[in-house]
Amino acid sequence: MRITIRYPQGQSHLVLRTSRDWEHDLEPVESSEEHAVFDVSLDEAFLSFKACLIRDDGFHWCRGSDYVVSRHDPDPEAWPFFFGAERGSVTEVMTFERDGRSHAVRVYLPPGYEENMLRTYPVLYMQDGRNLFFPDEAFGGHEWQVDETMDRLDRMNAVRKVIVVGVAPMDRMRDYTRAGYQSYGDFLVGTIKPAIDRAFRTRTSAKDTVVMGSSLGGVVSLFLAWNYPAVFGNAACLSSTFGYDDDLFARVEREEKRPIRVYLDSGWPRDNFDATNAMRDLLVFRGYRLGDDLLQFSFPDGLHNEDSWAGRLHVPFQYFFGRAWAAARS
């Protein structure tokens, strides 16, 4: 098996250490300024490893949890970092304005973003941006704990690293409903996303771009993927108020099937449970396959609030960014 480590080496040198012998340096069989390749024989089911950097100021282990490779991993590679915090960071508020519309945005950057400049990242655009990162900004002081959840899943080696863009609505009841979600979508597609792609090392394709929200934010997330499938290839819709003030049931039923993946969930019994099940059934009727391009869960006693969404946020994160799902689709 070959393991590729991608890191700008400069005057330094990359070696690999594994759980077979954490004191032994495995030298690369191929190396350049931007990567090193290691041959590893793998008789066991899995093996833990860490990249190590040798330079003038000493020997440095990469930060974070061990990487783990399995015998059937198709093409293992890693983008390590060796210095700095093991937690992601959240930017200051950025404001985007055009034609009388204004949206506040914060961006979560994963651990190692500033150091390993070779890596590019899928992007998650989340609605209700003030509720995502900080309790003093969030509704009722309850935030989604997006950064904490992303950091935890990264330590588990459960997901790929991701950039998260939290977008605050200008007028939630208008931006997220039929009255205004076209205007909101045009602004997101025409102003915010291009600016994010210029400012950060993003993967810009639709398959690497996800929109997510809850309640009316879930409604507008499905609208965004359905209306702009060449931009947003994935939508996560938590506790969505489908049918309240939108035309999505009618559009999904009569329009051409979109090449998107959709995650749906709801609590039970009073968390838009019936509306979510109805949207699931319609999507299946239109040709989406449960467990493939459609995933749906119902959470007993799940509530319509930030604490409940924070508690199950890891599920759509793993669906869209999880290593296991990526391997299954490869």
Image (cartoon, rainbow, N blue to C red):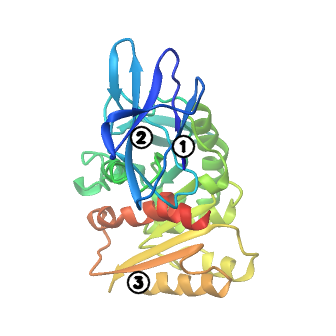
- First along the sequence among labels 2 and 1: 2
Q: Which residue is mark 2?
A: 110
The residue depicted at 35 percent of the width and 52 percent of the height is: 146
Measured in 3D between alpha carbons, the distance from the residue under mark 1 to the one under mark 3, in whole angstroms, is 33 Å
Q: Residue furthest right?
A: 256
Q: Are marks 1 and 3 in contact (CB under 8 Å)?
A: no
Q: Give residue 190's position: percent from left, percent from top.
A: 67, 44
Q: Which residue is mark 1?
A: 121
In the displayed structure, 68 sits above or below 251; it is above
What amino acid type is highlighted by mark number 2? Answer: Pro
The residue depicted at 44 percent of the width and 30 percent of the height is: 15
Q: Are marks 2 and 1 in contact (CB under 8 Å)?
A: yes
User: Do we see residue 220 in this rendering?
Assistant: no
Q: Which residue is mark 3?
A: 273
Q: Give residue 168's position: percent from left, percent from top.
A: 45, 49
Q: Nearer the viewer, residue 97 or 316?
A: 316
What amino acid type is highlighted by mark number 3? Answer: Phe
Q: Nearer the viewer, residue 168 or 222?
A: 222
Q: Which of the two marks, 1 or 3, is nearer to us in this view?
A: 1
- First along the sequence among labels 1 and 3: 1
What amino acid type is highlighted by mark number 1? Answer: Tyr
Where disc 3 sits, the SS reads helix
Q: Nearer the viewer, residue 199 or 27?
A: 27
Quarter of the rendering occupied by the C terminus: bottom right
Where disc 2 sits, the SS reads loop
